[in-house]
Image: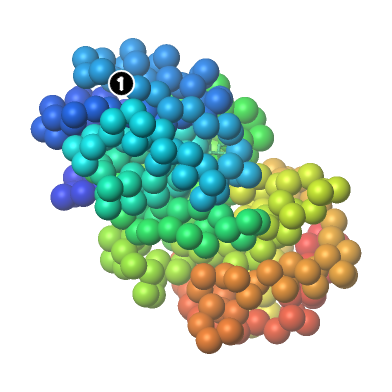
Amino acid sequence: MEKQIVKQRGSIYCNGSAWASLQTAIDTLKPTKIFVLVDANTQEHCFPSFLRLSGTSTLLETITIAAGEVNKTIETCTHLWNVLAKKGADRNSLLINLGGGVVTDLGGFVASTFKRGIEFINIPTSLLAMVDASIGGKNGVDLGVLKNQIGVINNPLLVVIDTCFLKTLPEEEVTSGYAEILKHGLIDSETYWNLVQGFDVNNIQSTENIIWESIKIKNSIVTKDPNELGIRKLLNYGHTLGHAIESFCLEQKDRATLLHGEAIAIGMILTTFISSELLNFDNNKQAAITQLILNHFKKRSFSTLEIDAIIGLLQFDKKNRGGEVLFVLLEDFGVFKINQKVSNDLIHKAFLHYQNS
Ligand SMILES: NC(=O)c1ccc[n+]([C@@H]2O[C@H](COP(=O)([O-])OP(=O)(O)OC[C@H]3O[C@@H](n4cnc5c(N)ncnc54)[C@H](O)[C@@H]3O)[C@@H](O)[C@H]2O)c1
């Protein structure tokens, strides 16, 4: 079965015809120049395969940035805008983002703003970018440690998914991406949640199927609500607290930074507990979700003062309205309520539940 979603912009092709679709897009666009944005790791591990698989004869220029979330900044963008200008990029140039979510978020933003916007294509190489970051058109950078504060919603011309890139992805990065797949289970259905419990990256066929299911879930939500006025907020399940935890850890010099998925995994445990308290999400299901997530993600500890600092960071969440912190909560798998207020006491209680689980 062909795994493809064809749209006017932002078509997604997975394995099968994916590389042929890339070639067709390039032939149609006839870009004056093609730039390929990579980070140091994807340059080493993914760029040689990209050259072989894309088979493009158009001259390519690579632009390499250092790897990691700390580089998802406006300073890196300034550097990239300068590099593009110096290398003679014009409005008919094409930027191909070959990397994880940092490269697709950052490259999408740079392309969307350079000379008021040039075309870009996402070729995600991490699990997280395949199932989430490269899809849906959100591009942007962090502001200091605050996540994704600056950005635009603008779909790539297309997204090319080739799961062969996962062969070189470090194990902890696979686990990080798995967090977003688990989120898709929680927000979609108990059936999908049960299916993804068997996720094993070494099982190529099942991995490809799960990645495609997750892409379809995300795509169906963003298609209904591209500008996040309502249902798209569901994709932020666990992210309100997850982003605050991620920002908090980025800012603490004496703490290990958490990978995006690790922070989201904690955020999902906390938010599902809060969902049980406020919306009667079934307690047994909630306990099973907590255990499953803890089976995959190392437990971290947070002191009362640190939890207060994390609560302080919630004020920067992009879903807030008029200074109010608003959560997405679940009544059951796939049954949700947006714009829910949660007291600080309940957040502390949720952390206690997490530490004691
Ligand atoms: N735009 C969105 O809708 C959206 C959604 C979810 C997450 N995100 C963002 O995505 C980012 C996280 O993405 P990520 O986890 O991919 O991070 P990442 O881009 O930092 O990639 C993780 C690590 O894996 C390396 N890597 C990537 N592919 C590889 C491969 N095939 N082989 C070897 N190494 C490889 C990278 O160099 C990096 O060191 C965060 O900034 C998050 O905010 C965006």
Q: Quadrant of residue 205?
A: top left
Measured from the top left, where is residue 296 in percent x and y? 69, 43
Q: Is label 1 in a helix, a strand or a loop?
A: strand
Q: Say which of 90 and 130 sits in front.
A: 90
Q: Quadrant of residue 85?
A: top left
Relative depth, front residue between 70 and 246: 70
> Does ligand 1 reach within 8 Å of label 1's beta carbon?
no
Compared with 243, 110 (above or below) is above
Q: Is residue 230 visible?
A: yes
Instruction: Say which residue appears at 32% left-offset and 46% top-offset.
Output: 114
Q: How many marks?
A: 1
Residue shown at the point (63%, 75%) measured from the top left: 315
| Residue identifier under label 1 | 60
- x, y percentage for residue 47? 43, 20
Tell me if 213 is positioned left or right of 355 in this view: left
Rendered location of residue 27, percent (x, y): 13, 27
Closest to the observer, 276 or 115: 115
Q: Residue furthest left?
A: 28
Asked if residue 215 can be seen in this view, the reply is no
Q: Residue at x 24, y 27 (%)?
A: 33
Relative height, residue 94 to residue 46 (above, below)? below
Work out whether 345 lies above or below 165.
below
Position of residue 203 in the picture relative to residue 257 (left or right): left
Label 1, residues with CA under 10 Å away: few <14, some 14-19, many ≥20: some
